[in-house]
Every structure is written in C-alpha cells, then in structure tokens.
C-alpha cells in the first residue's frame, strides 16, 4: 500500500502565492516607517514620529498575528496610510516652520 501525501490545497496555494508580495510590502512599509521615526525624532516632529511608529506596529501585527482571512493585507494597507499621513504631517510642519522663520526676519 502506498501512502500519498496530500498536496497543497487550492487555498494553500493561493496563500503561498501571496506570501512573498506581502512580506516584501511589509518590509518596505516597515523601513519607511522606521526612516520616518528617525527623521522625525531628529527634527522633534512628534505627530510624524507617532504615525511612523503606529505604521511599524501595524506591520508587525499584520505579519505575526497568524490570521489568514485578509487581516494581514488590511493591516499593511492601514500601516501604509499611517506612514503616508506621517510624511504629510512632517512635510507640513517643515513648511510651516520655514514660513514662520521667514516672517521673523
């Protein structure tokens, strides 16, 4: 009698197909969030730092929560939104600071 190993199910194959892009996206978002936190920390931009840190935390949740029902992808999308909002807040803060410095002279 020959024992057969069951192959990956169609759902398992789909999960494997999406694993590499999710991990790549997670890494990119985490690096962007970390860069935002470091730059904001040096320039003392608190809201941008918080947004970047939340983005990193959401990436960690998405990748290590063990959920397979699309929660990882949703967490990555929300993390990306936090990083984009953080960059926007940082940029607006820098622009406002430049305007205030110009009017002091």
Image (tube, rainbow, N blue to C red):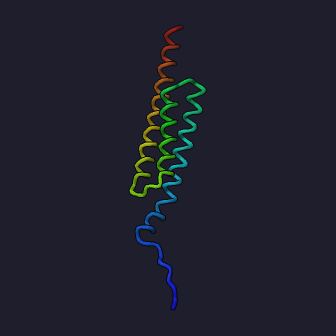
Q: Residue furthest front?
A: 1
Q: How many marks?
A: 0
Residue 15 against residue 98 in the figure, above or below: below
Q: Position of residue 14 (x, y in %)?
A: 43, 66
**Location of residue 70 (image quadrant):** bottom left
Vertical side of 105 occupied by 53: above or below = below
Q: Is 87 left or right of 38, judged from the image as shown?
A: left
Quadrant in the picture for the C terminus:
top right
Q: For the point 47% across and 55% down, which residue is it?
A: 66
Image quadrant of residue 67? bottom left
Residue 93 horizontal/vertical position (percent): 48, 23
Give the residue at x 45% y 42%. Answer: 79
Residue sitting at 42 percent across and 58 percent down?
Answer: 68
Between 80 and 101, the one nearer to me in the picture: 80
- Vertical arrangement, residue 90 with respect to residue 80, above or below: above
Q: Residue at x 56, y 23 (%)?
A: 44
Residue 46 on image: x %, y %: 51, 26
21 shown above or below 11: above
Residue that sits furthest to the top in the current view: 105
């Amino acid at each position: 009698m020959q024992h057969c190993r069951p192959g990956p199910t169609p759902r398992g194959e789909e999960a494997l197909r999406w694993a590499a892009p999710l991990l790549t996206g997670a890494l990119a978002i985490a690096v962007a969030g970390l860069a935002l936190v470091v730059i904001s920390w040096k320039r003392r931009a608190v809201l941008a730092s918080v947004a970047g840190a939340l983005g990193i935390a959401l990436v960690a949740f998405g990748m290590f929560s063990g959920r397979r029902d699309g929660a990882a992808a949703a967490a990555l999308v929300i993390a990306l939104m936090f990083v984009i909002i953080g960059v926007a807040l940082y940029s607006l803060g820098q622009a406002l600071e430049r305007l205030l410095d110009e009017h002091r002279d």
